Amino acid sequence: MDKRFQTLMGVTGSGKTFTMANVIARFDRPALVVSHNKTLAAQLYEEFKELFPENAV
């Protein structure tokens, strides 16, 4: 199994953004986060800007 790529799926409110942020911070590597619509992409952008103020989002 190739462990370089992962998919995170969960219901609303299950902590997906929190989990993604922790994985990104722990591995300290570039990450690609894909959203299925612009509204969710904008929400992720705003949350990641707060969680990673020193990084490009």
Image: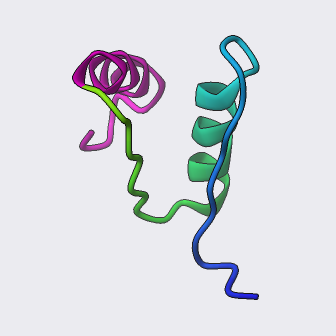
Q: Residue at x 28, y 15 (%)?
A: 39
Q: Position of residue 38 (x, y in %)?
A: 23, 24
Given residues 51 and 3, the one toward you in this image is 3
Q: Quadrant of the C terminus?
A: top left
Q: Residue at x 62, y 55 (%)?
A: 7
Magenta span main SS:
helix
Q: Position of residue 23 (x, y in %)?
A: 66, 50
Q: Is residue 28 rendered to the left or right of residue 57?
A: right
Q: Residue at x 41, y 47 (%)?
A: 33
Looking at the picture, the colour scheme in use is rainbow
Position above or below: 20 against 53: below
The magenta span reads 38-57
35 in magenta:
no
Q: Position of residue 18 (x, y in %)?
A: 65, 27
Q: Residue at x 40, y 63 (%)?
A: 30
Q: Quadrant of the N terminus?
A: bottom right
